[in-house]
Image (spheres, rainbow, N blue to C red):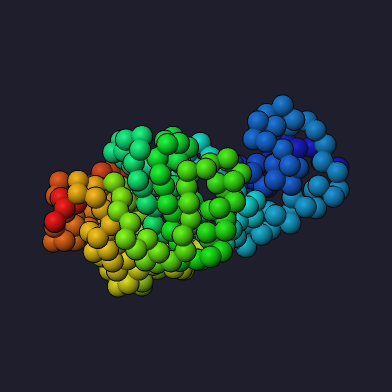
């Protein structure tokens, strides 16, 4: 028998991360975030302690917290995540903000490579009259995204399986957004930390990391309404290269926006039409 405060202190030291220790304990106990504050003196029984210890060990072996608990917060949504989906990152909320700034109530929006559905569902939550479609090559990822839509009662997103715009033949959009894979194939980070557990197809994209961005930029020209926007997340050092790809493909008003850490994160442009 051990008090919550001691169990948490011990786990936080092992993980060198207090928040992760709390998230794992709350998962074991099935409690919400606020629970810890008022329950530091509660006593854990042997079974709870053993279950908590097992999760702490999985984390020490490298497994991401979000895959252990099966969910991650993004925007205002608590989203189911599985190893079939990338774990949503806080910096991707910039893409949501930029998307919302560019759409009107009746906008047609496509989110390419939606994974857990994070971007599409956040936009849908803020703009419930927009007509949104989310694609993913992975049927397993799309199943997660569909469950996330259902869990949050979001009805204005439909889902289509396939690469980028392939399942959307003949459709045009006012806005296309994507957080595609953009890490360089030989980047050593792919072999470190949480990235080792995430789907490689959601992370890496050719020698310079831009293979999928080039595909999306090219394909989107046939799927944007005149004056429609394309917005894509990318790495901190890829802003100039992504802008060059957009400009060479004929997009106008090409720009890059920085995330909260003042790093280039999202680039985009407007498709002027034919
Ligand atoms: N931002 C992620 C990372 O560097 C990569 C996600 C992506 O490739 N879209 O960990």
- Would residue 255 be visible to someone looking at this image? no
Position of the N terminus by quadrant:
top right
Which is nearer the eye, 9 or 25?
25
Q: Horizontal and vertical percent for residue 265? A: 30, 49
Q: Horizontal and vertical percent for residue 43? A: 83, 36
* Above/below status of 157 relative to 188: above
The residue at 16%/61% (across/down) is 249
- In the image as oriented, which residue stretches furthest toward the front? 170
Position of the C terminus by quadrant:
bottom left
Q: Horizontal and vertical percent for residue 13? A: 63, 47
* Left or right of residue 112: residue 148: right
Q: How many marks?
A: 0
Which is nearer the eye, 145 or 92?
145
- Would residue 176 be visible to someone looking at this image? yes
Quarter where residue 152 is shown? top right
The residue at 24%/60% (across/down) is 222
The residue at 52%/59% (across/down) is 142
Quarter where residue 166 is shown? bottom left
Which is nearer the eye, 54 or 67?
67
The residue at 86%/43% (across/down) is 45
Which is nearer the eye, 106 or 57?
106
* Left or right of residue 142: residue 169: left
* Left or right of residue 187: residue 52: right
Q: Horizontal and vertical percent for residue 19? A: 59, 41
* Above/below status of 234 relative to 139: above
């Amino acid at each position: 028998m051990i008090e919550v405060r001691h169990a948490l202190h011990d786990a936080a030291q092992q993980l060198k991360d207090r928040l992760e220790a709390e998230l794992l304990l709350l998962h074991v106990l099935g409690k919400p975030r606020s629970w810890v504050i008022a329950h530091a003196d509660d006593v854990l029984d042997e079974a709870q302690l053993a279950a908590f210890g097992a999760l702490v060990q999985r984390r020490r072996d490298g497994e991401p917290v979000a895959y252990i608990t099966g969910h991650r917060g993004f925007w205002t949504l608590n989203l189911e995540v599985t190893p079939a989906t990338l774990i949503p990152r806080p910096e991707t909320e910039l893409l949501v903000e930029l998307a919302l700034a560019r759409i009107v109530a009746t906008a047609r929006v496509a989110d390419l490579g939606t994974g857990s559905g994070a971007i599409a569902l956040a936009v849908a939550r803020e703009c419930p009259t927009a007509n949104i479609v989310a694609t993913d090559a992975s049927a397993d990822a799309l199943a997660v995204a569909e469950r996330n839509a259902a869990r949050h009662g979001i009805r204005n997103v439909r889902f289509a399986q396939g690469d980028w715009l392939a399942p959307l033949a003949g459709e045009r959009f006012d806005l296309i957004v994507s957080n595609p894979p953009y890490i360089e194939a030989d980047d050593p980070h792919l072999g470190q930390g949480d990235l080792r557990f995430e789907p490689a197809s959601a992370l890496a994209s050719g020698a310079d990391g831009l293979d999928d961005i080039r595909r999306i930029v090219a394909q989107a020209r046939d799927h944007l309404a005149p004056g429609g926007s394309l917005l894509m997340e990318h790495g901190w050092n890829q802003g100039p290269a992504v802008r060059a790809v957009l400009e060479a493909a004929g997009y106008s008003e090409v720009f890059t926006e920085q995330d909260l850490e003042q790093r280039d994160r999202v680039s985009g442009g407007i498709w002027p039409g034919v």
